[in-house]
Image (spheres, rainbow, N blue to C red):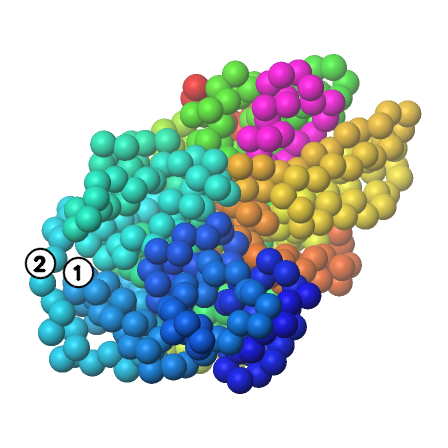
Amino acid sequence: KVKLQIDKQTIEVSEGSTILDAAKSVGIDVPVLCYHPDLSLHGACRVCVVEEEESGELLASCAAPVNAGMKINTRSIKARKARRRNVELLLANHPNDCLGCNRNGSCELQDITYDLGITKEDIERVSGAVREHEIDDVGPALRRDLNKCILCGRCVRICEEVQGVSALQFTQRGFNSVVTTAFDMPQRDVNCANCGQCASVCPVGAINEKSEIEKVWSALEDDDIHVIVQTAPSIQATLGEEFGMRAGSVVTGKMVAALRRLGFDKIFSTDFAADLTILEEGSEFLKKLEGEGTLPHITSCCPGWVKYAEHNYSDLLNHLSSAKSPMQMFSALGKTYYPQQSGVKAKDVYTVAIMPCTAKKFEKNREEINATRFKDTDAVLTTRELARMIKEMGINFSKLADEDFDELMGTSTGAGTIFGTTGGVAEAAVRTVKEKLTGEPLEQLNLGFRGVNFAEVEIGDRTVKIAIANGLGNAEKLLEACREGDCECDFIEVMACPHGCVGGGGQPRPATKEKKIKRGTGLSGIDDKSVVRKSHKNPQVIKLYKEFLGEPMSGESHHLLHTTYKS
Ligand code: HC1
Ligand code: SF4
């Protein structure tokens, strides 16, 4: 332990703590910008400077370790002036067009500017030459506006350290310094997986999802278009944060009520399609266990992971499940089964998916993904985009009374719901596979929140080995072992985002590890309380097979629900 003084309070913290950690431990907030609790230290913005009283030295509190006997003043006039100057310098080279910015109201630079009392006059005094970069919005998933970048490097660090992708880097120096892709190419054209982790940690309006809000408003306003919506499993445990609720608050009923007020004709659940995925993918896995096909079986519901695999592991693509993601299964049915059952003409159906994910915007555009004559998924909105629409409509979200999903494709089981958190897909699959094969139920797998985890399940006379990885950097560790032939696993779940979809690139910001764990716990809570917790017991999925698809892996299932990959 190290004893020191912060703002006249004597405290003890563990050795190796930073001054920022020490301040936090006693409830003192020091502003930060380049610092992010889940990333390595950068120490570049110097917005977190504090004064060491005896030497008068200014220290970047996020990077400076505590020393015994140190006396730190976080609020001295010298520290505050330095912080202001450092923020003013950032603003000098910033467009400062907050009113029209996508981060207006949720921007860390805006908040700090306000908290430090920086005025319009201060900004005008420092303003000088401003960079002019072209906006990169040619891709389907992300929009990059480098004019707003403050060079905090969070996107560079998450893409390299956590995702192992390194699609973004610092280039050039001084005033020309910029964070961009190789050869400044559109993000669409490089090795980016579209996971949107860069957008998730960006403190300002420099990287965001490509918005599809206007498209969806147009569809909703057109009386000739019948708009059906599906909500991904994780949204029910994250949307509340956009309305000031605690991370992990379960808002399923309010979410459905809000979607009805927005004017959607039918409100359905991706969790239903997740159950369906388990029946298709589970059957595929069973066949592989019986010797037909290549083990280990690797999941393919995450489009960020699929794109990453296509770039980096084309030799392993034959291990990927051919089952489409739940989102795409749902949409293919939305334009075939739904019209058949509802009497609405397929050409009039418009399908919207509410996803935690920016890569889903890319997935819906994949050439080989469409099974119908139409575009299967017409629009993908992130959790954040949905929240904006609810706010625009003036809906008082927290006061809404709970409502239920619509019939036909709105019922799900606990197994479908846990897809949204790491380990959930594997758990759901094994629940069904074990029971189908042996008639015995599965004990809890509890694959938990670790980045890589393993479990073994006895299925009949066989031990089935399961592995999960979340975050592409963790996936790499697991897949390198597979490539080398050192992997004894039978089933591997990979989700591109840390903690799975609860940590998706389109989820509410700021998103820390702690919050993601709470969101995951929210989803597990729904599963725990569910009466039906196995995908093959979903009554609407049973009806779908009986009335439309026949059986898992049937010709019709194959046509609508399975896909291929490109190396
Ligand atoms: Fe996901 Fe999935 S769980 S991929 O994370 O398999 O996006 O939530 O909708 O498709 O079901 C995302 C979440 C989501 C799909 C399902
Ligand atoms: Fe999208 Fe989920 Fe995959 Fe992240 S983990 S890229 S949110 S599907």
Q: Position of residue 21 (x, y in %)?
A: 55, 66
Residue interval drawn in magenta: 475-496
Amino acid tagged 2: Ala
Residue at 46% over, 31% down:
308
Q: Is residue 402 something one can see in this rendering?
A: no
Residue 476 location (% of width, % of height)? 55, 31
* Residue at image mark 1: 93
Q: Position of residue 335 (x, y in %)?
A: 44, 42
The quadrant the C terminus occupies is top left
Q: Residue furthest bottom?
A: 8
The answer to whether the residue labelled 2 contacts the one labelled 1, judged by CB atoms less than 8 Å apart, is yes
Residue at (75, 63) in percent of width and height = 529
Describe the element under mark 1 as helix, strand or loop: loop
In the rendered view, tell whether residue 454 sits above or below residue 553: below
Q: Where is residue 383? Give x, y as percent.
A: 45, 59
Compute the Cα span from label 2 to label 1. Answer: 7 Å
- Please state which amino acid type lies under the numbered disc 1: Asn
Q: Residues within 10 Å of mark 1 (few under 14, many from 20)?
A: many
Q: Residue at x 65, y 64 (%)?
A: 14
Q: Residues within 10 Å of mark 2 (few under 14, many from 20)?
A: few
Closest to the observer, 317 or 287: 317
User: What residue sits right under mark 2 in the picture?
Assistant: 129
